[in-house]
Image (tube, coloured by chain):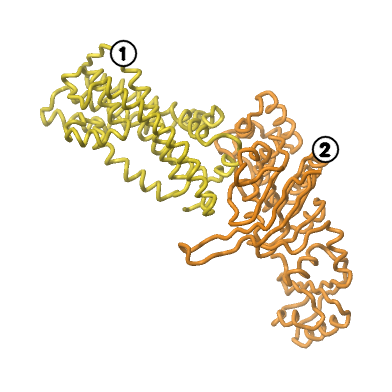
Amino acid sequence: MAARAYPRVIGSLREPSWLVGDIILPLLSIMAFVFYYRAMGAPEVFTGFVVLGGAMIAYWLNVLWGMAAQFYWEREVGNLQLYLISPMSRMSVLAGMALGGMFSTTLRAVSTFVLGFVVFDVQVNLTDPWAFIAVFLITLLALYGLGMLFSSLYLLFGRNAWRLSMLAQEPIYLVSGFYFPVKELGFWVGIAASIIPITLGLDAMRQLLFGVELSDGLLPVSVEIMILLVIAVIFFVLARYMLEYMEYLGKREGRLLTRWL
Amino acid sequence: MMDAVRVEGLTRVFKINRGKRETVALDDVDLHIKDGELFGLLGPNGAGKTTLIKILATLLLPSSGSAEVLGYDVERQAQNIRPLINMVAGGEFSGYGLLTVRENLWMFSQFYGIPGKEARTRIDDLLARFGLTEYADSKVRTLSTGEKQKMNVIRGFVTDPKLIFLDEPTLGLDVNSSRAIRSFVSEWVSSGDRRTVLLTTHYMAEAEQLCDRVAIIDKGRILACDTPSNLKRSLDRVTSYVIETSALEGVEEIGAVPGVKGMASEPLEQGLRLRVQVDEEASISEIVSMIVGRGAKILSMSKRESTLEDVFINLVGRGLE
């Protein structure tokens, strides 16, 4: 796992040009939402929602493109067969990829978070930092479980799965409530969107960071944590079987290593 | 002695055009490769060589038949096979351009759980063996094609596999690089216990030089399988000629001359080179007459010892390219 994380970390250090795109540009994108909310006269707490959501987007993008799509990229550059003939488990490969990407992703998230809070003078009401950290970590766990599940699709479907990811990227920003409480979309829409772990994760983090009253949470934090834990387990178990099954299908149909698929 | 590879009735069919057509890549292949053997698989592009290797390397499932690698079934026991094998393909790049040679090799060694210190020792030894020590700390993207392929070969051998698949490992390389790789492969097989190599190539000289036994494959079928010398001896009744001519039309009609068992032609700068196999010496005079009768000049003609290419031409009726 560490071996697979290694090229990601080294790549980040040897080509630091990503720093501009991953630190300055995310700040610019959340600025737009902050100005929209201020122009509309929204409560000031929404600025904090935008900063938090903007920071968590880094992890969502890492799951979609840094993990899920990774088998597609490895196939295109010719490394996939070397991973598949090695005795390493597929989940270890993916976990290593995620771990390696975590370095730049976390840097992006933290910089967005800190800069956003400083630039926009966001006020917080964090009464239980350990709970906040726990929710954050459980959310990541469930999110990366989902990423492993997605990656099984890439193993077989290649570019079609790529298009699915592109399709999923923007709508998920909306229904998961990255920049606003998801309850604004209606309770049941929020519940349906909870299949994406970041929905409940963001909702719980907002409640812990800004207070329950201001955050208009979908469900109590304790319930959201339980659901996230259950989702994480389900995704990891599903991912394990899906990876095996998709690999089997790919080998049976002869599509596992076909490029430009 | 156990077979390193045992293939019986292996068939692989690919469906293409959304299942409207089928192509048979392997057709009822039987093959046994002994432990410790350097086994060659010789055939033209599209013969089924890479398909066979992918099945044995657990990257592809057979459509029917069975295949065992080192005693394990490729379908049901792939996890038992993987720690024991590795693969090197020619014309492919492995690893990451941003990492150095040493970093790439270390990374791939860790996928096989090789302890760090042992991995570093093996890497250093192999880098020295291939003359790449000075490039050890260079980023891979700065290497030439030959150097990248040498690194690729090292990557395959650093895990010290029991069985290694070499799929055209010298493809596109210059003479020196190719020679270095062949020399290493030959030494590697003979220096260890129960080390087996399955080498695919369409370079005849490579197969003749390296392989204990060679199987000739074309259109998914094994046409012959024996030692290179036995295969060549099978052409005792056939005489091989190489004829160089000026530009010549209708060369395929020469193949229809009675007594011609096989023919291959390759273009030269100013004409054609024909390799002809005849079972009657008299046929060659008719061939000469035909060439001259079409207004072409015979630039040179020689009778020679059979090579593996002649064996191939005799079996398939055409050249390897």
Q: Nearer the viewer, residue B140 or A73?
A: A73
Q: CA distance from mark 2 to mark 1?
A: 61 Å
The answer to whether residue A108 is above or below residue B87 is above
The circle on residue B209 is none
Do callouts 2 and 1 mark residues in contact (Cβ within 8 Å)?
no
Marker disc for residue B191: 2
Residue placed most toward the observer, B184 or B229: B229
Q: Which residue is mark 1?
A: A129
Residue at point 48%, 44% (across, down): A245
Of the pair B84 and B87, the residue shown nearer to us: B84
Image spot of residue B76 (x, y percent): 60, 44
Q: Quarter of the image containing the C terminus of chain B?
A: bottom right
| Mark 1 belongs to chain | A
Q: Chain A in the picture: what colour?
A: yellow
Q: Residue at x 56, y 42 (%)?
A: A79
A92 left or right of A55 in image: right
Of all residues shown, which one is farthest toward the left? A41
Amino acid type, label 1: Pro
Q: Residue furthest top?
A: A127
